Image (spheres, rainbow, N blue to C red):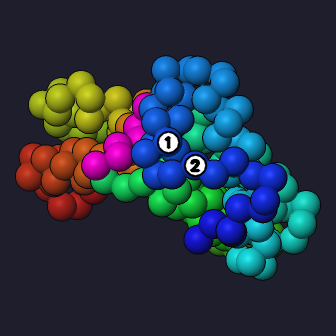
Amino acid sequence: MPDAPASSDPVLDRDQLDSLVEATARKDRDAFAALFNFYAPRIKSYLLRLNAPDSLAEELTQEVMLAVWRKAETFDKSQASASTWIFRIARNRRIDAARRAAKPTLDGEDPALQPPEVEMPDDAAHATGREAKVREALKTLPEEQVALLRLAFFDGLSHRDIADRIGAPLGTVKSRLRLAFDKLRRILDDDLL
């Protein structure tokens, strides 16, 4: 993935790079500076090869290196090398940027964007009963799962934003939310979900 180092670039092997990420996890600024100097040009070049415009490649490179600084403690050299880990972050940021750019414009006539209809009294009473059942069902879940549900549904955070906020891997957040829903489904009638 990375470009061949230029003649003025330091030559670092896998163990040295892994050690720099581990030192960065301990908030060692010198180690991070070395990582930044080594990876930033390589990441930008990689992003340009992924058809990112120059300004976007520069911006995403900064985001990737900031993510490395913030999430270095999640790096596990038994799972992947520092290069694989960092370039995976870069690839994911590029994919996210492409998705954001591809979002369609909103149609003001879309029924989903129209105000809700006035609720009938019977419907309101039924909704109150459903709400009480859901609240009781939530009490049976571990607090960790309830907290994730609050972040997802009450705060409106995406799974990635939740993972960033609580400092957990994205897959862990998705698994925990799935477990919470499975437990709720077993407790509640299908028509409540």
Asked if labels 1 and 2 touch by Cβ distance under 8 angstroms, the answer is yes
Residue 144 position by quadrant: top left
Q: Which residue is mark 1?
A: 16
Q: Residue furthest right?
A: 55
Residue 105 horizontal side relative to residue 121, left or right: right
Q: Residue furthest front?
A: 7
For the point 43% across and 45% down, the residue is 15
For the point 56% across and 20% down, the residue is 27
Visible residue check, residue 168: yes
Q: Quadrant of the C terminus?
A: bottom left
The residue tagged with tag 1: helix, strand or loop?
Answer: helix
Residue type at mark 2?
Answer: Leu
Camera-nearest residue between 185 and 87 = 87
Residue 17 in the image, given as x and y percentages of width and height: 52, 44
On residue 12, which mark appears? 2
The residue tagged with tag 2: helix, strand or loop?
Answer: loop
For the point 71% across and 62% down, the residue is 5
Q: Residues within 10 Å of mark 1 (few under 14, many from 20)?
A: few
On residue 191, which mark appears? none
Q: Residues within 10 Å of mark 2 (few under 14, many from 20)?
A: few
Residue 62 in the image, given as x and y percentages of width and height: 76, 46
Q: Is residue 30 above or below residue 127?
A: above
* Magenta span contains residue 67: no
- For the record, the magenta segment spans 71-78
Visible residue check, residue 127: no
Q: Is residue 129 above or below residue 14?
A: above
Camera-nearest residue between 131 and 182 = 182
Q: Quadrant of the N terminus?
A: bottom right
Alpha carbon distance from label 2 to label 1: 6 Å
Q: Is residue 5 above or below residue 172?
A: below
